Image: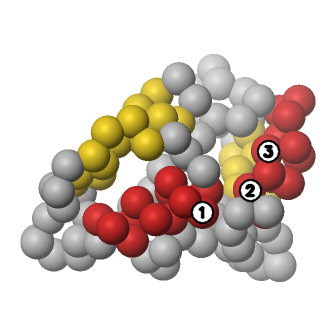
Amino acid sequence: MTRHLQTMKAFYINQIGFPLVSETNESFTMQIGTDQLTYRQTDDVDTQYHMAFNIPENVFQQGKAWLVERTLLLIEDGQDEIYLISRTRIPATFMIRMRTCSN
């Protein structure tokens, strides 16, 4: 859900380059790897987003370079990567946070 449907579409489709699968006046769906993500227009209170994309460790730097060509990365404590220690059986991972059109 978003109050900024056209802005989100411009960011993810035009700037980041995710393929557009479908759209209506009230929503759009994009392809992200093997998954599809749909944003729908809302007039409710502005919403906050957190999306995570798994990038295999062996192509992490390549994925990061691809993303840097398209948007700004968020910096925290002078770092643009965060190392997450997993509480499950999933191996610990690095994370890149990107600045989207709404933050």
Question: Label 2, on which residue?
Answer: 67
Q: CA distance from mark 3 to mark 2?
A: 6 Å
Q: Quadrant of the N terminus?
A: bottom left
Counting residues from the N terminus, which is met first, the one under dot 2 or under dot 1?
1
Q: CA distance from mark 1 to mark 3?
A: 15 Å
Q: Residue at x 51, y 56 (%)?
A: 12
Question: Label 3, on which residue?
Answer: 63
Kind of residue at disc 1: Gln
Nearer mark to the viewer, of 1 and 3: 1
| Mark 3 surroundings within 10 Å by alpha-carbon count, few (fewer than 14), some (14 through 19), many (20 or more) | some
Q: Residue at x 48, y 35 (%)?
A: 31
- Whether residue 47 is visible, yes or no, is no
Counting residues from the N terminus, which is met first, the one under dot 1 or under dot 3?
1
Position of 63 relative to 98 (above/below):
above
| Mark 2 surroundings within 10 Å by alpha-carbon count, few (fewer than 14), some (14 through 19), many (20 or more) | some
> Would residue 80 appear left or right of 5 to someone viewing this image?
right
Q: Position of residue 32 (x, y in %)?
A: 53, 36
Camera-side residue of 25 and 76: 25
> Would residue 74 appear left or right of 99 to someone viewing this image?
right
Whether pointer 1 and pointer 3 mark residues with C-beta atoms closer than 8 Å, the reply is no
Q: Position of residue 41 (x, y in %)?
A: 18, 61
Kind of residue at disc 3: Gly
Nearer mark to the viewer, of 2 and 1: 1
Q: Residue at x 40, y 60 (%)?
A: 9
Kind of residue at disc 2: Leu
